[in-house]
Amino acid sequence: MNPVLLVGAGGTLGALARHLVSVALPGERRDTLAVNVAGSFALGALTVGVADPGMLALFGTGFCGAFTTFSSFAFETVRLYERGDRREAAGNATVHLVGALVAVAVGGAVAAAT
């Protein structure tokens, strides 16, 4: 199948899933952290455990690309900083970055072990 269609289909599903998480976890920043950590875990597992380029286009680039949201993380962090909540902004950045890096490593390790 055409990789562009696979990315588009995965992106549609990822965007819908992202919306459902934001509805299920209302409130400032919880949904953003949840999707970024979960998406990083999934991408780590996919890149280690899946060799098929079509599946990587569908789920890696498409689904994970639309599900995760670096822009929301950046916006929320800058908004905290501009409000004067410098410590909270630094904490938000740290939790997101460390959480995502750990999640991608754990996802890859889980896929490698199975």
Image (spheres, rainbow, N blue to C red):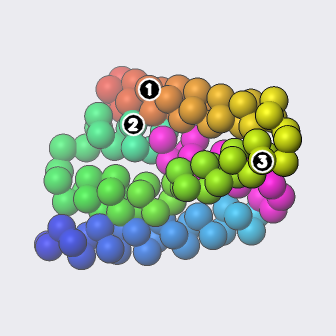
Crowding at dot 2, Cα within 10 Å, few <14 / some 14-19 / many 20+, comes out as many
Q: Nearer the viewer, mark 1 or mark 3?
A: 3
Say which element carries label 2: helix
Give whichever of discs 2 and 3 has the lower sequence position. 2
Give whichever of discs 1 and 3 has the lower sequence position. 3
Please report the residue visible at 50 percent of the width from the left and 48 percent of the height from the top: 39
Amino acid on which disc 2 is placed:
Gly
> For mark 3, what is the residue?
82
Q: Which residues are magenta?
A: 25-40
- Name the side, left or right, on which 109 lies relative to 55: right
The quarter in which the N terminus is drawn is bottom left
Give whichever of discs 1 and 2 has the lower sequence position. 2
The quarter in which the C terminus is drawn is top left
User: Does the magenta-highlighted stretch encompass residue 33?
Assistant: yes
Q: Taking 12 as reference, is 30 above or below it?
A: above
> For mark 2, what is the residue?
44
- Image mark for residue 105: 1
Please report the residue visible at 67 percent of the width from the left and 62 percent of the height from the top: 21
Q: Locate residue 93, reporting x and y percent.
A: 65, 35
Q: Nearer the viewer, mark 2 or mark 3?
A: 3
